[in-house]
Image (cartoon, grey):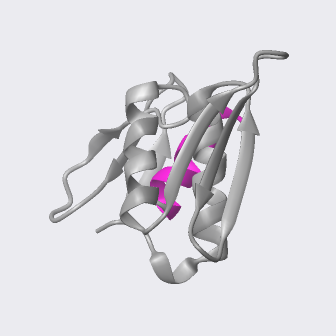
Amino acid sequence: MTPEELTRAVAERCMGWRAVSYDGLGNHWGVCGPGNELRGIPAYATDVAAAWEVVEWMRAKGYDVNIGCYSRGGRWVVEALTDTRAFGERGASMPEAVCLCALAVAEAHPELGAKP
């Protein structure tokens, strides 16, 4: 999945964005929250600050989130844990691993839904 595809998937499935589009210049646009104002979507798959919003989404859904980096190979790992469920994903960057983990949580728990 490209960073653009990953950002779009997280925006729609986890973060509550609608009418998401990509302009081909590195920007995603969409509607989130009340009203229909078109706004820029954070680059969840490439920006650490934006990825942290996704971490907070997982925490708000009841998951403890662990983030680490393997010294050998430089791969990042993100785990989302509850007493009964565990998800873990790896990525080349922290934002990528966070997004992949959030999508695994969202796929396993469609009832959690995107934030409003």
Q: Where is residue 59 in the image (x, y as percent from the top left)?
A: 41, 58
* Residue at the bottom extreme, as displayed: 111
Quarter of the figure that contains the N terminus: top right
Query: What secondary structure is the magenta-colored segment mainly?
Result: helix
Q: Does the magenta stretch include residue 6?
A: yes
Residue stretch rendered in magenta on the structure = 2-13
Query: To which quarter of the image does residue 70 belong?
Result: top right
Q: Does the magenta stretch include residue 87?
A: no
Quarter of the figure that contains the C terminus: bottom left
Q: Is residue 75 above or below residue 96?
A: above
Q: Is residue 41 above or below residue 31?
A: above
Q: Which residue is more in the foreground, 74 or 51?
A: 74
Q: Does residue 63 appear to the left or right of 100 in the view shown?
A: left
Please tell me which residue is depicted at 46% across the width and 52% down the height of the picture: 11
Residue 1 can be seen in this image: no
Please tell me which residue is depicted at 73% across the width and 46% down the height of the picture: 89
